[in-house]
Image (spheres, helix red, strand yellow):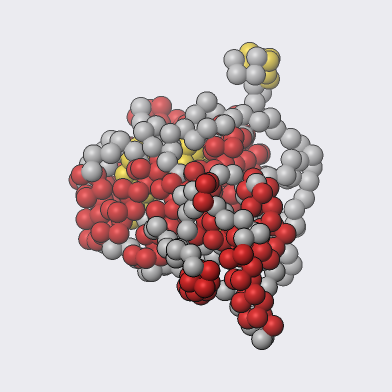
Amino acid sequence: MAERKVYFDETTKLLQLEEHMYQMVEVEDPQVFRSLFPYDEIPKIAFNDRVVPHHMPDDIWITDTTFRDGQQSRTPYTTEQIVTIYDYLHRLGGPNGKIRNSEFFLYSKKDRDAVVKCMERGYQFPEVTSWIRATKKDFELVKDLGMKETGILVSCSDYHIFYKLHMNRGEALRHYLHIVEECLEIGIAVRCHLEDVTRADFYGFVVPFCTELMKLSARYQLPVKVRVCDTMGYGVNYPGAVMPRSIPGLIYGLRVHAGVPSEWLEFHGHNDFYKAVVNSTTAWLYGASGVNCSLFGIGERTGNTPLEAMVFEYAQLRGNLGGMDTTVITELAEYYEKEIGYEIPPRTPFVGKNFNVTRAGIHADGLIKNEEIYNVFDTDKFLKRPPLVAVSNTSGLAGIAVWMNNYFHLPADRKISKDDELIARVKVWVDNEYDNGRVTVITDEEMVKVINEACELLGREKYKNED
């Protein structure tokens, strides 16, 4: 065995010992990590305290799967809806293309028509990419449409290789490499989707496979990207967690052991264990330039990483928005609810109707004194969503005053105080409602009616919403 070499790493500025080359390990029986994934028990999170360094790439971005994974769990979008959403994504991503690409199915005429119309927009970002079946015929379809890149499913856990494909590891590896090479031969860059990687034999299959992918890329002088698919949501971000559940370990291993550059690495998370967002952020921190997301997290089973969440994760990590226009997020939410008929759960961060609404009187009192006390950031500035209160039996005078000021968009010189007689009269009505057995919050329509009735009694001008 050749002796490993010491070399100087230009990134860390440290001497490093050359890593071992990992060969594919053929097995007679599938390695399903039964100690970690006992099907009749809750999965285990084990630790060996092996940690890897942070390695945030110079540039990070978001990729979109709204029209691919996002369509697998809902009524398909119409062609017109796809084009409209694509326009929104272009505006949201901004001039620097922080939403780098968007992937499309090509199975139906409707999807292909949408691809053509989106490409006709002429946007540099999001680049239109595809998701196809792994056949020569579909590769030609991608080429005919003028697409530069396509995604290919390459399932990599023994659960899939043995039980779904009915192959062994060697057969699967040769099959995948043949498909990728066929695609590269006709000039299409490839994005390999490592399905179920958080249950795969990382060193015995994933690293050797990705090493071969990098060799093909070098031979054909075309990118071969690698999407790290946490298909079942088993990934964890905890330092020292064992493979294959460790997101830091997966990203580090693909960079260092398989030689996949950060700009060709992206993470695709599912939310089965509520970890899609934190795992996506972790992938950025440890060396993946891309995180793959779906609008509002709509996707298979519990959904994907919400795209809007990663917009704000980007801003928190970088200290700026990279040119993204976050107000488009609110426009998208309104479009989904009003035009598409999709009901966003009301407590969904950033987009749910109640995400910055308080019902507690003591919180409302804090808001009226200084909204920073109970609002995560200036939601009016970034989302056109000022903080609101829902009026109930716990809102108190302050809650009613905050509701009025925000609902009617009253400027600073016209804001109403909780000590105003008008507020006292409205509170009497609210208290009577709950004294008589009401259990629901007061609706906006009821509040407007009661406020304007009180204005009449006090001889004041009535209020109206300027929207």
Quick check: 265 above or below 372? above
Task: Residue 464 in the image: state x and y as whole percent.
Answer: 42, 63
Q: Nearer the viewer, residue 105 or 116?
A: 116
Report if residue 201 is visible in the image: no
Q: Nearer the viewer, residue 312 or 456?
A: 456
Quick check: 259 above or below 316? above
Which residue sits furthest bottom? 436
Quadrant of image for the N terminus: top right
Relative horizontal placement of residue 431, taking residue 388 as reference (left or right): right
Q: Nearer the viewer, residue 29 or 465?
A: 465
x 49%, y 43%: residue: 381
x 72%, y 44%: residue: 238
Quick check: 16 above or below 406? above
Task: Residue 349 in the image: state x and y as whole percent.
Answer: 57, 55
x 47%, y 54%: residue: 409
Report if residue 105 is visible in the image: yes
Task: Residue 447 in the image: state x and y as whole percent.
Answer: 52, 71
Q: Splitting the image into 4 quarters, where does residue 243 fall?
A: top right
Quadrant of image for the C terminus: bottom left
Quick check: 139 above or below 256? below
Relative horizontal placement of residue 294, taking residue 87 as reference (left or right): right
Relative horizontal placement of residue 293, taking residue 179 as reference (left or right): right
Relative horizontal placement of residue 77, taking residue 376 as reference (left or right): left
x 66%, y 39%: residue: 249
The image shows a total of numbered marks equal to: 0
